[in-house]
Amino acid sequence: MDSTSLEPSLYTVKAVFILDNDGNRLLSKYYDPELYPSMKEQKNFEKNVFNKTHKADNEIAFLEGMTIVYKSSIDLFFYVVGSAQENELMLMSVLNCLFDSLSQILRKNVERRCLLENMEGVFLVVDEIIDGGVILESDPQQVLQKINYRADDNPLSEQTVAQVLQSAKEQIKWSILK
Amino acid sequence: MIKKFDKKDEESGSGSNPFQHLEKSAVLQEARIFNETPINPRRCLHILTKIIYLLNQGEHFGTTEATEAFFAMTRLFQSNDQTLRRMCYLTIKEMANISEDVIIVTSSLTKDMTGKEDVYRGPAIRALCRITDTTMLQAIERYMKQAIVDKVPSVSSSALVSSLHMVKMSYDVVKRWVNEAQEAASSDNIMVQYHALGLLYHLRKNDRLAVTKMLNKFTKSGLKSPFAYCMLIRIASKLLDETEGGHDSPLFDFIESCLRNKNEMVVYEAASAIVHMPHCTARELAPAVSVLQLFCSSPKAALRYAAVRTLNKVAMKHPSAVTACNLDLENLITDSNRSIATLAITTLLKTGSESSVDRLMKQISSFVSEISDEFKVVVVQAISALCQKYPRKHSVMMNFLSNMLRDDGGFEYKRAIVDCIISIIEENPESKETGLAHLCEFIEDCEHTVLATKILHLLGKEGPRTPQPSKYIRFIFNRVVLESEAVRAAAVSALAKFGAQNDDLLPSVLVLMQRCMMDSDDEVRDRATFYMNVLQQKQKALNAAYIFNGLSVSIPGLEKSLHQYTLDPSEKPFDMKTVPLATTPITEQKTEIAPIATSKLPEKLAPSRQDIYQEQLASIPEFQGLGPLFKSSEPVQLTEAETEYVVRCIKHTFARHMVFQFDCTNTLNDQLLQKVMVQMEPSEAYEVIHYVPALSLPYSQPGSCYTLIRLPDDDPTAVSCTFSCTMKYLVRDCDPNTGEPDDDGYDDEYVLEDLEVTVADHIQKVLKPNFGAAWEEVGDENEKEETFALASVRTLDEAVGNIISFLGMQPCERSDKVPENKNSHVLFLAGVFRGGHDVLVRARLALADGVTMQVTVRSSEETVVDVILASVG
């Protein structure tokens, strides 16, 4: 919270991470190589942030000289980190975009299992919203359009018998062809 | 199986994680199916996801295995599955730094980047730029230029952002894309606009004129993107700050107009920019404060937080501007977000009246344990500011602080509290005893060595002068028994001070010292032995020199001198006077209350400014043999701010010489200056011995030239002198764009302002923590006294300020602060005169229709006393 004003720059986001309700990292990206360069420091930071934030859903916190905006859903915690001088509302717009985009590709099931099942989609969403710390897109509709990804229509558990048979056939075919 | 979810796992509850027990080797094994034909997109996709997941978890991949997986992955470009391709791009980016030969995918990526599939183009550009190095960049330059102006927004944005990333690596190449970026800036897409603006600014930020032009253009044309607006506001406020533009500037108008933007993000950015401007008047702040006031009642926590945090900053400088928001802030003190509540309360503490202090303190103590350390520090700082404002409240505050001190908390937090208590003690003599008592209690159980030593030092300084010094001895001696070496050593030093100051305690202190002499640590034993011997002499002068007032030399300087001495052994004993003095003695003034200091800068012993100069000067052959650098002055401007050449001078004083360092900057881009030197004409018996010219001074690159003069030997009282300065140089005109100079040049000169050398240039500030002892130590052998009338001065404060800046000496015993409503004051000043003579000044001031001043000077050298008195008169 230094009073010096911010150097004009597009590098807005210092880090973004998603934790589960035990504080374990599911995804995390650090964009400033000077901030927590080692994995140990990163996980330590995430632990501290989690301990301070998981009890009350307060939307915003200030820790270790960083402004952190966050949001939780069922058993997931989403965090966007910026410098102390950063415009909090910019960080909020990143967080909202991340959350809304994920909520769409996960068909509103924003919970740990569903997220992990669609991890590739999650990676792609984060990649479309932030590139190296620069906000690339903040409109969830645009993000979805760009990645063109939907959660599996037929998670395996809900596949019809016919489909299971079909896929079994395919597999046998390929194993013979090998 | 494509997606393996163990049924059992699933049943066991939320613990199911398809990635939980991933093993790197197994995943890499699986990656072999990348080579199968035909490619099974779903399986491959899943494996790529696993690899990225592992990398994300911090799993370490060796170069060989990463390279192997990477090469296998390249085959997946044959598949046309969209998601799979996108995951390939991600893998490329993730592995760019761990795998070798990543550039082999260049052609595939270039193909995707220029292909027909728009969904591939943007991400392909970003992946490509990640693996491209300077040499390869030329090859893709053409594609990048096209991509920047592409009509598909995602392509253009990707190209712009990637260009920005590459500016660090190859500025010169990216600079050539300015025109394309300019074109992109007028795009309809809001993100493209934002990214183009960011890139343009980054390429032009060193060229103030270009930035100004760019700002003019965009502020007039108007932008759609709120992000771009925020960026513009930041650029504008930076420019205002640099040019020290007044608040009638069109830039300020622009920022103010943004307060009426319909997007909250922009409004907040503008308000925050105005608040952070230096020298903002209350009237200019008012519109910003009123939008922040509106935000205080927003349902969005982030907005409330942002608003109250900014108001808190306003309150530090202009508490009255925030009073209008008091009601809104009152509503926030019960906010469920404790950060917001804390900020609201600390703001109210600054703006509210004395009567509300008790209530607010009560409120905050109810949840102080719930907030993070950062905010606890904010609270402590607010209290510290409050104590200065309402000294009468110190007992409430002290109580609160001592409670906080007992709570758990990190080092920063504890340090803030200790600093705050120390400052209260210094401000209010009547709170000294309670404060010291709290601190004593704290060090009984303190895990932070730094704080314990700091407090022990304070006890040593303040304790002996309290009515009952004996009660602190127990606390100090407990440290000797229980703590680590550093703390024990500090405790021994503190004990010695009690012994030196209080004769009746001396016998007991000596007994304790004797015990310390049996300590297991060398440092502790050494200190104890040393102090023991000094104390046994029972001589005031010895006590003053070795116990109360420590060394005042620069530590790095001492280290260097000692090293030099050991390299070059001689019969002569080491002379302390050859060591440069510390330039910035630990000031007794209370440190500025930094607005929530959370800087993470490591507090190492950085070489001081003077040590750097010493090094620089020593590297110039002409200046060798001048001895150690005695003092370097603050830079003096010798030109107006906005002239063709900007010159400032730093005066370096040596024992018998002075070196003037002229830092010159050439602000004309069509000129190259050569052989630049500053000719000096002294008014007194000073003699110019040598000029060291700056060989070449290209546009906007500062350079230094030096002038060496000898101080007059025969007349030591000639301390002040005026020099008329002229800068002489050879001009070669050159092309503003290429910087290529013409072959011939011509001589020219430029008249600079006169340079003054005053008595302050000959005196180095030295802090004597115990002035009285130092005064006795120097003795009255060379004491002289004179009385002056300062007719033009109206207040004691002004007189004190004038004397300090004129003599350039260090005020001691906090005597630079004149208590209110007093008609007389005594100022104590200490310093060292060129040549290493201690000099002490005691000035008694009396206010009666102008200020009358009686100056008493003591020094180890008689001429020095004369010099000072002569210069004052």
Image (spheres, helix red, strand yellow):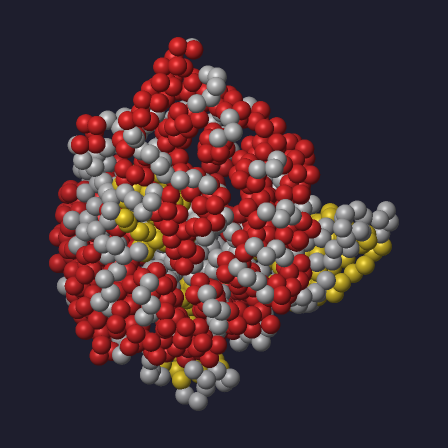
Q: Residue sitting at 64 percent across and 31 percent down?
A: B136
Q: Nearer the viewer, residue A79 or B406?
A: A79
Establish if A46 lies above or below B48: below
Give how far across and how far down residue B397 sits, in percent: 21, 68
Q: Is residue A154 visible?
A: yes
Measuring from the top left, give residue B20's x and y in whole percent: 27, 29
For residue B293, above or below residue B72: below
Which is more toward the observer, B107 or B121? B121
At a point 36% along the width and 49% down the height, the residue shown is: A99
Using the rendered image of the protein, determine whether residue B570 is visible from the camera's viewpoint: no
Image coordinates of residue B693 in percent, x first then y, are 72, 50
Q: Is B125 left, or right, of B81 in this rendering?
A: right
The image quarter in which residue B62 lies:
top left
Tell me where residue B817 sits by quadrant: bottom left
Most foreground residue, B515 or B146: B146
Q: Is residue B128 above or below residue B63?
A: below
Instruction: From the viewer's perspective, tell me whether residue B309 is left or right of residue B288.
Output: left
